[in-house]
Image (tube, grey):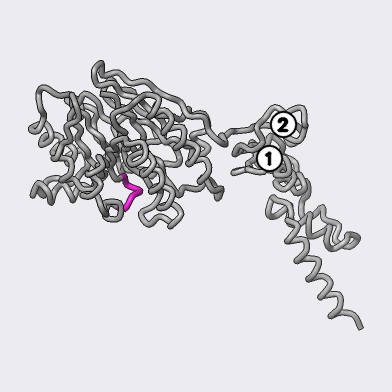
């Protein structure tokens, strides 16, 4: 059997205010193309389908169209679980009917104990859950941490193993020793909300979701597929994609995705950034996190850079900001009020007045001058 492992679609996510709908749609098209080209027997979708528990109507419409395309049009079985960003109750709506088209949606811990047999494989779907849900299910008040809860769930799943089958677990949590990025909601508090890799050793493969980088975990029998789209600057250097798992050999192959708009870091001086020789070699539609090496004030720096790089998501200075003036250096008696205001704002706010702020100030000065005229 061949399966495509993906996770963390986060439909509805924004990148520092920028809409990622087109990027997510493009990534989905590539995933569909890979699934069809590899003739997969199913898709393992390991949680965080949405970015929030109450997604917008447009997000629901987008995800519905994706699932419909894969499951109804392409007739590819889907094995999905809810993640910590999903509302389990909401995405569980209709789950019993979905099974008629081989779309399996697990949203409750009890779903993990109803394995799905596909060819030579048993698939166990363990959605994101809080430890209290396991304590209630097992009627065991001693279960208070995630590692205890997963250990109890795994112990029960092992009693359901068919010895003649391969065993795949699909889950959404943090495995001890994994590395994180800024865009992930942390599920660890004092190390108590992580699961030891040893707990998962009896599965032939564990298809994980939650962490957005595929290199987050290095294990023979478990991996995070990572998100198909970059969601933060900390993911700038990550290669996004999906895994193809072959259960006959229990090997997996990574298939990269090409971003519609990449996330990149630039660490340069202002003069370098506005030099055509430098920026003509860049894809200016990408999202940029810029760190300036300059320490002196640059008038309207963000607006000027956005004329070249329209999708700037952050702008910082490498060594901070050195004001060019001290309050005692301001010659109040012989300066135009607007020039004085701009210098004072630069000194105090360590930024330039925006065009809108300048307009407000000019309007206020005109009003003040009229009121003092005899």
- 364 with respect to 116 (left or right): right
Taking the image as shown, residue 42 lies to the left or right of residue 149, namely right
Q: Which residue is drawn at 75% across and 41% down?
A: 296
Counting from the top left corner in percent of width and height, residue 63 is at 40, 47
| Residue extending farthest front | 73
Discs 1, 2 touching: Cβ within 8 Å = yes
Helix, strand or loop for the magenta stretch, by majority: loop
Helix, strand or loop for disc 2:
helix
Which of the two residues, 44 or 315, is positioned nearer the viewer here? 44
Quarter the C terminus occupies: bottom right
* Residue 221, picture quadrant: top left
Whichever of labels 1 and 2 marks the residue nearer the N terminus, that label is 2
Q: In this view, does 69 lie to the left or right of 101?
A: right
Farthest residue to the bottom: give it: 374
All told, the count of numbered labels is 2
At label 2, counting other C-alpha atoms closer than 10 Å, the crowd grade (few under 14, some 14-19, many 20 or more) is some
Q: Where is residue 200 in the image (x, y as percent from the top left)?
A: 20, 29
Distance of mark 1 from mark 2, alpha carbons?
9 Å
Q: Which residue sits at x=88%, y=59%?
A: 335
Crowding near the residue tagged with mark 1, few <14, some 14–19, many ≥20 C-alpha atoms within 10 Å: many
Q: Which of 36 and 365 is in front in this view?
A: 36
Q: Which mark is residue 309?
A: 1
Would you say residue 85 sits in the magenta stretch? yes
The answer to whether 372 is drawn above or below residue 215 in the figure is: below
- Determine which of the numbered discs, if any, sits on residue 249 in the image: none
The residue that mark 2 highlights is: 279
Res. 83 image quadrant: top left
| Residue 14: % across, % down | 50, 48
Magenta span has 254?
no
Residue 314's image quarter?
top right
Point out the stretch of residues depicted in magenta: 83-87
């Amino acid at each position: 059997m061949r399966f495509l492992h993906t996770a963390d679609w986060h439909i509805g996510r924004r990148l520092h205010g920028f809409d990622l709908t087109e990027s997510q749609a493009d990534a989905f098209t590539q995933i569909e193309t890979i699934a069809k080209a590899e003739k997969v027997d199913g898709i393992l979708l390991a949680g965080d389908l949405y970015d929030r528990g109450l997604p917008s109507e447009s997000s629901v419409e987008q995800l519905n169209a994706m699932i419909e395309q894969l499951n109804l049009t392409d007739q590819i079985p889907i094995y999905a679980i809810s993640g910590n960003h999903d509302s389990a109750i909401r995405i569980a709506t209709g789950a019993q009917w979905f099974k008629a088209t081989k779309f399996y949606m697990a949203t409750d811990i009890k779903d993990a104990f109803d394995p799905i047999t596909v060819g030579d494989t048993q698939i166990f779907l363990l959605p994101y859950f809080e430890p209290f849900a396991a304590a209630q299910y097992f009627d065991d008040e001693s279960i208070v941490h995630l590692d205890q809860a997963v250990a109890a769930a795994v112990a029960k799943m092992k009693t359901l193993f068919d010895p003649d089958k391969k065993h795949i677990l699909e889950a959404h949590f943090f495995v001890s020793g994994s590395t994180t990025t800024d865009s992930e909601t942390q599920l660890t508090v004092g190390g108590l909300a992580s699961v030891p890799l040893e707990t998962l050793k009896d599965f032939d493969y564990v298809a994980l979701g939650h962490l957005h980088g595929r290199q987050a975990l290095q294990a023979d029998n478990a991996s995070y597929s990572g998100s198909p789209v970059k969601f933060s600057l900390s993911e700038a250097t990550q290669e996004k994609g999906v895994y193809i798992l072959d259960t006959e050999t229990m090997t997996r192959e990574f298939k990269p995705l090409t971003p519609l708009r990449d996330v990149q870091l630039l660490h340069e001086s202002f003069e370098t950034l506005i030099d055509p020789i430098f920026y003509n070699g860049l894809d200016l539609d990408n999202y940029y996190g810029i760190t300036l090496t300059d320490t002196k004030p640059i008038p309207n720096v963000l607006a000027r850079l956005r004329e070249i790089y329209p999708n700037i998501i952050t702008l910082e200075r490498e060594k901070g900001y050195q004001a060019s003036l001290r309050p005692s250096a301001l010659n109040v008696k012989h300066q135009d009020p607007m020039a004085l205001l701009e210098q004072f704002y630069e000194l105090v706010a360590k930024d330039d007045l925006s065009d809108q702020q300048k307009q407000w100030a000019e309007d206020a000065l005109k009003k003040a001058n009229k009121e003092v005229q005899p």
